Structures are given as C-alpha cells and as structure tokens.
Amino acid sequence: MLSVEHRLETFWLISVTARTVFDRTRSYTVNVSGPEVKRVTVLGQEAVVDPQARGGPAFSLTGTEHCVEEHRVSRTFDGMSGEPGDFSRYLAFSKTEIADLATFQPEGTLVVPPQVRATAVVRQVMAEVVKPVQHVQVIHEERVDVEAIELNFHPVYAFEYEWTAKGKRAVIEFDALTGEIRAGGKKWADQFKGMLSRELLFDVTAEAVSLIMPGGGIAVRLVKAVVDRGK
C-alpha cells in the first residue's frame, strides 16, 4: 500500500414545496333515469335533457371548482457533477453542523468542494415542482417555499496500492458510513486546493433567484436582511 487519502465528498439536499389556490369552470354531464325525462330542475334552474348524449339521455351543468394543488419534492444531487443521485442512505446518520465553511479544514482530511452551486440544483427542483395550472380562470394564491438547501459532507477513504511485479497501481475507495467498497477509484488531493465559503456555494442572491423564478429576488432580499441582522 502506497498511501491513504481521507476525504469529505459532498452532495446537495434540496426540498421545495409549491401551493396554488385557484378556480376553474367545468361542465358536468348528468345522466337521467330514462328516455321519458325531457327537462330537469336543479337548484332552481331548468336544464334541457339531450336524448342523444353519449351514455344515454343526460343534461349538463356548469360549475366553478375551487381547487388547491400542493406539491413537495426533496432531491439529492452529486456535489461534483450536479446530477441527481440517491444519497438518501446518508441522511439517517447523525450530523455535525459546520459553523464557518471558510475555516473548515479538518487535519489530515481533504475537503472536496462542490463544483456545482446551489442555484444550479435548486433550478432543477423548481422545474419539477412549478407546473402551469390547466383550464384556470382565477389564481388566488401561488406560493413556492424552498424549505432546505443543504450541503452535506460524507467521509471516504481512498487506498492506493501498487502491484510491484506488474508495475501497476490501483485505488480502492471505502465509504466510511455505508461500508461500501469500490474498485477503480482515484485520489483527489492534487485537484482541489481552493477554500470554501458560504457566499461561493450558496449563491442564492436576489439576481440568481430571479433567474429561477421571476420576482423571487424580492423575497430573497427580505430574508437576507433578516439573516444579516441576526449575525
């Protein structure tokens, strides 16, 4: 064995909820009891029966549907590629919150910074949650809440071996949480030397959010003002 690399790799956890309250007009077809029925009085209004209606003689009513649509999506993404991935297996483990990313550098550990920023992965979840409402007449409420933007680190060990007789080298990766072992790995120590910062990774600025959702920058300014005041 030539060397051991202990590193912290990253994944994003994004949770978004959407709520829309709206009205839409719909026509309802109601079948009658027999061909002898010519007219029906419902709620004080008289409706004419159509004897040629599909499914038998029927009449139509027009009403307003009062609707509430709610969606919640929680997704995890690889911190390097930004591709969706199933990192839920790590969420059951206990966590330690990092107070200051700029000074987070555990001794003897390589902290691998994510190559994908928060807005890139939030945009993917937004596209999944925010859908146009069909056949709507009036929208009373349209709200999107980003409940979680979490950058998580999980520990990996990379063991570099050399087969001296063959002159070959290989890296085997060991997942310190799940116990999984992967062949064909690599060492990353020479690739990442940059510092981490909250501003660099969590670039959820008013301008960035406006790219995701028009008008969203106003809410970001308000939240940022509250957070900055609480520091």
Image: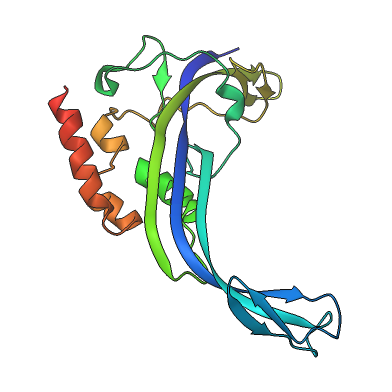
Viewer-closest of 112 and 230: 230
Quarter of the image where the C terminus is located: top left
**Is residue 115 in view from this perspective?**
no
Q: Give me the residue at 55% from left, 15% from top.
A: 93
In the image, taking residue 81 as reference, residue 85 lies left or right, namely right
In the image, taking residue 200 as reference, residue 191 lies left or right, namely right
Q: Give me the residue at 52% from left, 53% from top.
A: 69
In the image, taking residue 118 as reference, residue 63 lies left or right, namely right
Residue 116 lies in quadrant: top left
**Is residue 216 in view from this perspective?**
yes
Q: Is residue 45 above or below residue 198?
A: below
Residue 126 place in picture, x, y as percent: 44, 51
Work out which residue is located at the far left of the displayed protein and give it: 229
Quarter of the image where the N terminus is located: top right
Work out which residue is located at the far bottom of the displayed protein and give it: 52
Q: Is residue 72 above or below residue 3?
A: below
Q: Is residue 48 above or below residue 200?
A: below
